[in-house]
Structure formats: C-alpha cells, structure tokens
Image: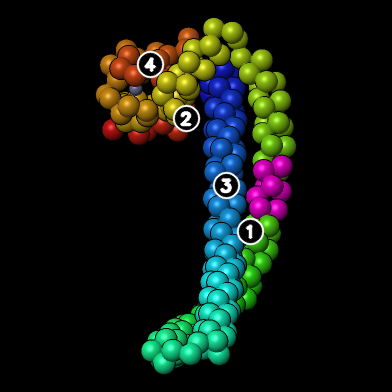
C-alpha cells in the first residue's frame, strides 16, 4: 500500500479514537448533573416532610391557644354569674358557658386528628430521611466513579492528542489539510477503499480512469462524487474485477 495512505489510515484511526473519547467526555457533565438532581429531589421530599410536621405543630399550638381563650372566657362568665342578681342574665351566662364548652370539645376533636396527622408526618420524615441518605450515598458513589472515568478519559485524550500531532506531522501539509477538512465535513470515514469499483464512502460507481489511477498508486486519488481519499490494495483486485 502507498505510504501516504498508510499514514492517513493510521491518522484516521487516531482521529476516530479522539472523537470517541471526546464524545464520551461530553456525556459525563450532563450525567453528573442528572445524578445531582436525583439526590436533590429526595432531599426536597425530606424538606417537604419536615415542613409538614412543623405546620401541623404550629396548627396544634394555635388550637391550644384557642382553647385557653375559651377557658378564660368561661372563667369570666362564671365571675359575672357570681356578681349578677338578675335571673335572666344568669341564664344567658350559663348559655354562653355551654357554648364555649361546646367549642372546646370541637377543638379537642380537631386536635386528635392533628395528632394522628403529626404521627403520620413524623413517620414520613423518618422514611424520607432514610431515602435521602440512601440516594445521597448512591449518587456520591456514582459521581465518584464518573469523576474517575472523566479523569481517565482526559488522560487518554491528552495521550491520543499528543501522539496524533506526531502522526499528523508525518503527512505533508496539503494532504493533511485536505484530509482534515474532509474529516470535519464527512465524519470519520474519509480515507476509503475502492470496493467493487465504487467509492467505499459514498458507494457511487467510480469512472474507470479513477480506478486505474488508484491502482497505479501514484498521486492521491479522490472520489469525484464525494471528495473522499481513495485507496486500493492488492487484495482488492479480485473484487474490483467483479
Ligand atoms: Zn465517494
């Protein structure tokens, strides 16, 4: 095989590895963000459960204050009853006291419901705490692995890039420029073989002259359709004759 083609194939292989590593590296950031969001979501649930407990507690305190208020009212009515001499007024106060007691009963019923809710909310906090801790541990582990992978990939990329520079310098400027332009525009398959007299990149049938030039292994030959660099090896002669 032509020496320049061999060099280009090695360079192409290196460039493929570089783009694979680069792509893998590009995925790590979003993957890490996704993991962080997962952990944040369980923490958010825990915060919400804690907030609910606090809300129920403050509601209970509010109810306690209401009961105290009603009890103070009853105290006041009882004192007024001691002072009054009017029967009507005494009766009216008795009625007020009954009403206040009624309200207290209702508040106490509501407090029982609140206590049950508080118990459930507390259980929810315990559960959410365990879930958040487990998620955090898992995510921390996974992020640790990702960081390690990222580090390895960066190292690999640095090595590939530096050896790529060496490989590239072995190719003359104009050929390299042509190759690099193709690699950018056509993707990772730009130095292609001639297969059954067709371009191995775009698969268009090649003019006989192009195939002949390619077989001569003289100047660099490109596909007249897609511009890819063509090469021909001895073991292709048979298939080309098809
Ligand atoms: Zn082509």
Q: Is residue 226 above or below residue 81?
A: above
Q: Which residue is mark 3?
A: 33
Span colored in magenta? 143-151
Q: Is residue 164 visible?
A: yes
Looking at the image, is 191 positioned above or below residue 113?
above
Give the foreground label among 2 and 3. 3
Q: Residue at x 68, y 63 (%)?
A: 137
Residue 225 % position (x, y): 30, 17
Mark positioned earlier in the residue sequence (4 or 1) = 1
User: Looking at this view, is 142 or 105 the one in front?
Assistant: 105
- In percent of width and height, residue 187 lies at 44, 27
Q: Dot 3: what SS?
A: helix
Comparing labels 3 and 4, the label whose residue is closer to the camera: 3
Foreground disc of the pair 4, 1: 1
Kindly indicate the quadrant of the structure image that contains residue 161. top right
| Residue linked to disc 2 | 188
Q: Nearer the viewer, residue 232 or 154?
A: 154
Answer yes or no: do the residues labelled 2 and 3 have beta carbons within 8 Å? no
Query: Residue 227's mark?
Result: 4
Quarter occupied by the C terminus: top left
Q: Residues within 10 Å of mark 3 (few under 14, many from 20)?
A: few
**Is 144 inside the magenta-drawn segment?**
yes
């Amino acid at each position: 095989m032509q020496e320049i083609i061999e060099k280009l194939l090695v360079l192409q292989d290196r460039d493929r590895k570089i783009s694979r590593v680069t792509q893998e590296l590009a995925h790590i950031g979003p993957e890490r963000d996704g993991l962080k969001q997962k952990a944040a979501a369980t923490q958010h649930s825990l915060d919400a459960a804690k907030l609910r407990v606090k809300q129920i507690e403050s509601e209970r305190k509010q109810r306690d204050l209401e009961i105290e208020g009603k009890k103070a009212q009853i105290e006041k009515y009882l004192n007024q009853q001691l002072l009054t001499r009017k029967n009507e007024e005494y009766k009216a106060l008795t009625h007020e006291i009954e009403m206040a007691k009624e309200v207290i009963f209702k508040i106490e019923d509501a407090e029982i419901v609140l206590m049950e809710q508080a118990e459930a909310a507390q259980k929810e906090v315990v559960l959410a705490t365990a879930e958040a801790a487990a998620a955090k541990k898992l995510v921390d582990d996974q992020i640790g692995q990702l960081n390690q992978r990222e580090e390895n990939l960066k190292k690999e990329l640095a090595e590939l890039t530096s050896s790529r520079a060496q490989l590239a310098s072995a190719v003359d400027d104009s050929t390299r420029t042509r190759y690099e332009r193709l690699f950018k525009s056509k993707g990772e398959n730009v130095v292609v073989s001639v297969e059954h007299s067709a371009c191995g990149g775009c698969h268009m049938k090649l003019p006989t002259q192009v195939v002949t030039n390619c077989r001569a292994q003289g100047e660099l030959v490109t596909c007249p359709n897609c511009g890819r660099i063509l090469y021909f090896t001895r073991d292709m002669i048979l298939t080309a004759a098809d």
